[in-house]
Each structure stands twice: as C-alpha cells, then as structure tokens.
DNA sequence: CTGAAAGCGCTTACAG
DNA sequence: CTGAAAGCGCTTACAG
C-alpha cells in the first residue's frame, strides 16, 4: 500500500542502505547512483516514514511546546514565532495547552517524552520544578519562556517584569495617584510575583504605604479580572487608579468598569501589563507595557535548536526590555 | 538508559507480550500476573514509547490540526476546543499554522502523513482540494472546518456565512444606509465568498445596486483591513457604513478610522463579522455576528474521532447558527 | 491464559 | 563507494 524505502531500492537496483544515504545527503555516493535513486523516489512518490526514523535514531524532528493558555494572544504570538523558527529549520511543533493546570502539564510532559521530541519549550504553571524534573533528568533539551523555574538552572527567555510593573505604577504616581489597586496573577506564577514586587517597589520609592486590601491575585483569566475589579470598587475607599497584571485580567476588569457605568480615565485611571493591538484603536486608548512577544518566541526556538545541537553548551538567559506605551487611560488628579 | 517493556517483563518474570497485554487492558490475564506487571511498571517507572507503538500499529494517537492563522483568536478558540476534546480521549494535537500559505499547507500535509497521524482537521487555504487530495487518497480521516473544499465530499463543520453576512448588512440597511462598504477575505477562501454573497443578497433584497468600487477583498489580515478602509474613505463618495468580513480586517479598519479622527458611529457606521470579547467593553461597543467557535472546534474533534473509529460511516456536515449581536456602532441616518 | 517470534520502516556500524 | 544485517521498542497472529 504505502511505499517504503525498499520499494525505492528495488526500483533503483540498489540496497535500502544506499537509498537512505542518498536521502540523508551522505557523501561518498557515485553521482550515477544518486541520480538513479532520486529518479526512483520521484517516480513512485516515496515519502519517508518519520516515525520509523524517530524510533531508529531515538530522536524526532519535533519541538514540544507547552503553553499555559492558548487563548491568550500573548502566548499565541509566542507560538507563532516558535513555529516560524521551527519551520525554517525543518522542525515541526507539537503544541500542548496546560491551561494553567499542573496535572495537565505533567501529563503532557510524559507525552512529550513518550513521543521522543527533540526538545521542549515550556511556559511552566509553577515556579518549582515538579514534573519538569523528569525532562531535566532525562536530559531532554529544555527552554523555559516567560516564567521562571527557581530550583533548576535552565536556558530561559523572559523580560524584567519587576521593572516593567514599576514603570507602569510610577506613571500612575506621577499623575498624582496613591490609592492604586492591583489585579495580578498569583505569586506561584513568577511573572505575577515579579510584577507585584515592581508595584511594591514603585510605591515604596514614593513613600506610599502598600495597602494589602488593594491587591488581588489569582489565576490570570478574564473571570478573575472581572471579580477582582468588583471587589476593589466595592471597597469603602476604592482606588483611584488600577494596575492590571496581564491582558486577560485587563479585559475582565474593563468589563466590570463598563458595567458600573464608570468612565476611564475620568472615574478610574487604568494601566495594563501586556499590550494588545486593539488597545490603541479604542477611546480612550490604553496605557500599557508591551513585551516583545514575537522576539521572545523566536529566541526560545533559537535556544532550543542550539541546545539540541550541542547539549553541553553553557546555559543562556535571554532578557528582553519591555516598552512603556503611555496613552490616554490615566489622568492627573489634584 | 531508558526503561523498555522487556525490562518490566524480566522484573515481573513474564514475557514482553504479557506486559503489553496488561498495559493495553486486554482480557484473559490472570489477576495475579496483572498485579505483578503493574507493580513492576510502578517500581521501575516504565513509560511506553509511543513512537514504537505507532510504527508497529501504523497509526498514532495524534490528531493533526492545520489552521490558517494562529494569531487569529477565532482559530485559537477552535484549537482550544479541539485540544480539550482530544485530551479527553487520550489524543494529542499536532498543530501547524499554514499562515494562509498554500505551499506551507502542502508541506504540513506531507508531514502529517509522514508522522502517521490518526486524522487531520484542517482549515484549508483554498477552495479546491489540491494537496488535501493526498490525505483523501491515502484515506486519512479528514475533517474540514470553517471553510469548504468544493470538489471533495468530506466531513465538515461550519456556519451559514451568507445568512450571517446578510443579517449584518440588513441591520445597516434598516438604519437607512445604502452606500455600504465591504472589506472581505478573497473569494478563493470560501468564507470570503459566502459572506460577499450575503452582502449582495441583502442589498438586492432592498433594491440597492451593488457598487463594485465599495467592495475590497484580500487576505484576511489586519494590514489589508487598514489599507482597504483607506481606499474606501478616499473615494469621491465614501460609504456611510462599513461591513468588515473578519476580526483581523476589523482591527485594521478601526485603526484607519481612528487615524483619520473619524468617530464611530457619528461619521461611519461599522458592523463586523466575528465577535471578540473586547467588542463589548469599548465605547461604542461593536455590532457583530458571533460564531460559536468553541462548539465548532468541539464538533470537528468529535467528527474526526468518530471517523477514526469508523472510517466508513456516512459523511456528516455540521452547520451552526451564528448570532447577530446588535450594539452601538451603527447609527440611523436621515 | 501465556510465550516465542515476526515485523512495522528506518539507520548505521561493520565488512569488503 | 556499496550491501547485508542488526536493532530501535513495540504489538499481535500463531501455537500451545
């Protein structure tokens, strides 16, 4: 039914070994033979079975990519970049969505190992190694993006989250705000933790006391943004400004704000982590800090390909600079 | 190094065959043996090699998913649904992004076959079978989502695009508009074609002549939405209302409109195909027609799983109803 | 109910 | 420069 390497071999009157060598572009093959083989491949339409190859050489041409939320455009841009890079190097991408769920992440890690992927790029759900240890021990090439793993020394791609959050909050302080609400990812997610640290640092710098009742943390999903903004606005002394810790929390918060009939920035100033394309087409446009997402994905793919090629090369940590984009969503108060 | 089935076998004092049978939950195995095997698996931490299994049984537990734009949230929701369904059935998803590029799509189709995926779900870049024929001829289970393939009878999941577009345009006509611009995906993409037909049908129904200069088509990407809106607004007699044919074209168009300082709906009414979460949090909120994206992905996964199980079952075409969501972006004129 | 053995389609060390 | 043969780790028809 399907055509195998030996079919090509018999048509070209050579051994399977020779066909394999021609296809792999190995040297020391007579030009005439090479031609004959290529001809035969063409005429019977041979397509290599990558599964058999993987079993034999014990490694595939596949990069595993585990992200924590496929519906978050931030990760989508990352996926896009990884895919572009992989494609350019004849690798395919095996994508899994952990959905911020540690059990799902573990299962997918097992799957990746079971499928003998060449390497894994992961956005981990937790700050501790956990199931990632399996990959590490099995010496599977590994790159961590966006977040960190604290207890393992790994190739990493990220940004300075604390600084970015600090810049955003400082912008609010510059505008005269001191009651600044924060809606963040939970601290087990390192980006959540670091961004919170940046928030605290900015307040401290200006001698503003951190009011714990103004800080809400949870899974970085829209529904929590929605819930947290309600809690903050129901406070006896609600904040005059809001810092949202990622794009999904932002959308949730905007829903809550709109439903109360509040106008940004008249009634509430807002600054957001992550920049989305549409932040600049709406009125008021949203002040945000942008991560170079595509570059981050690109760098992650680059690191994994280098690590696959040379498993013993020194660990690299790539850090990008986020960019503060001041727009119209924060206003000066007295 | 890695532990194989025969390691389990020797530890449990049985044959590899027996281990395999226990792991596959085959009947006719003595309870005592079953226990011993499971124990052994546990103690040495055996994890099956899925590559070897795939080679042996000539089919993997992987569903191939080829979408045309991974950065489009519409497809992202689709991916999410497919992934959820696959996960629930112990399948993994092999995701490829054709980027609306036929050559890339062809390459990925070859890859899927080479990796012996159990089935393929595809959002095709073209209306004609082309490289999809390969899958069809090789009898690889196949489901087409969102768009159509005209010359092949396949399991399909979609919506009534013409009707949805018709509803959207009728809403504009109800508001008194007759010069209605349309920014659409090119007609080789069947959704683009069908939505255009719906636009034409609505105009015809009200005796409004179709003015070809008001219609622009191209790849459904933001940059084209941007370009097309500029062209339409530069017309000697620009449209009073705009119908955008997908979410990316909408974002592009909104950029162009904002840059000219035009106010929606005062200066231009806008209705959009595809609903995004943020359409309802902005002011004015955007009138749009929503596809049940998650359901569509779910149905596609369901179809492919059924097709894998029973390759000879009759072809199914699943059609969903889009929902018109009237908001604030279109206004009545004279 | 269980085992020995063949075979899925490749690649590569070995021999010549 | 080329071929015969082993082997990657499974599953399953066959035999008992």
Image (spheres, coloured by chain):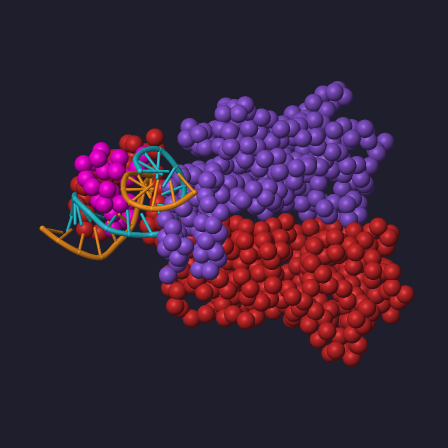
Chain colours: A red, B purple, C orange, D cyan
Query: Does residue B99 show up?
Result: no
What segment carries the magenta color? A3-26
Residue ID at (22%, 44%):
A18
Which residue is nearer to you in this view: B322 or D9?
Answer: D9
| Residue B268 among those drawn in magenta | no
Which residue is nearer to you in this view: A248 or A123?
Answer: A123
Give coordinates of residue B95: x percent, y percent: 51, 45
Q: Is residue B191 above or below residue A238?
A: above
Question: Relative to B69, is A188 on the left or the right?
Answer: right
Query: Does residue B160 show up?
Result: yes
Which of the 4 image quarters holds residue A287? bottom right
Residue ID at (45%, 65%):
A137
Which residue is nearer to you in this view: A178 or B322?
Answer: B322
Give coordinates of residue B172: x percent, y percent: 77, 31
Question: Relative to B17, is A173 on the left or the right?
Answer: right
Q: Is residue B104 above or below residue B186?
A: below
Question: Relative to B103, is B262 on the left or the right?
Answer: right
Give coordinates of residue B327: x percent, y percent: 80, 39
| Residue A8 among those drawn in magenta | yes
Give coordinates of residue B45: x percent, y percent: 46, 58
In the rendered image, the quadrant that contains the C terminus of chain B is top right
Which residue is nearer to you in this view: A71 or A291?
Answer: A71
Predominant secondary structure in magenta? helix
Which of the 4 image quarters holds residue A186? bottom right
In the rendered image, the quadrant that contains the N terminus of chain B is bottom left
Residue ID at (83%, 33%):
B333
**How many marks overall?**
0
């Amino acid at each position: 039914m399907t055509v195998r390497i030996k079919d090509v071999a018999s048509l070209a009157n050579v051994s399977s070994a020779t066909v394999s060598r021609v296809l792999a572009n190995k040297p020391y093959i007579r030009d005439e033979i090479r031609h004959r083989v290529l001809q035969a491949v063409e005429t019977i339409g041979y397509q290599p079975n990558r599964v058999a190859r993987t079993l034999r050489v014990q490694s595939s041409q596949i990069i595993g990519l585990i992200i924590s939320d496929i519906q978050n455009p931030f990760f989508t841009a990352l996926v896009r970049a990884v895919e572009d890079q992989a494609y350019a190097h004849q690798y395919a991408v095996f994508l899994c969505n952990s959905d911020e769920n540690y059990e799902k992440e573990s299962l997918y890690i097992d799957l990746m190992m079971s499928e003998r992927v060449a390497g894994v790029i992961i956005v981990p759900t937790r700050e501790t190694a956990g199931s990632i240890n399996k990959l590490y021990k099995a010496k599977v090439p590994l790159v961590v993006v966006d977040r960190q793993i604290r207890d393992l020394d790994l190739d990493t791609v990220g940004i300075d989250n604390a600084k970015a959050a600090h810049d955003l909050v400082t912008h609010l302080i510059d505008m005269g705000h001191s009651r600044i609400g924060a809606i963040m990812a939970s601290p087990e997610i390192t980006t959540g933790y670091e961004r919170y640290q940046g928030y605290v640092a900015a307040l401290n710098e200006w001698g503003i006391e951190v009011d714990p009742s103004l800080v809400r943390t949870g899974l970085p999903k829209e529904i929590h943004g929605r819930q947290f903004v309600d809690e903050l606005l129901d406070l006896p002394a609600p904040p005059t400004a809001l810092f949202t810790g990622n794009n999904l929390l932002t959308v949730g918060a905007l829903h809550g704000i709109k439903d109360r009939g509040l106008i940004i920035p008249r009634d509430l100033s807002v600054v957001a982590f992550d920049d989305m394309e549409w932040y600049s087409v709406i009125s008021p446009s949203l002040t945000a800090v942008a991560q170079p997402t595509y570059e981050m994905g690109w760098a992650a793919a680059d690191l994994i390909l280098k690590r696959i090629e040379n498993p013993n090369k020194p660990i690299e940590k790539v850090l990008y600079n986020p960019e503060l984009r001041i727009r119209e969503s924060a206003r000066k108060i007295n």
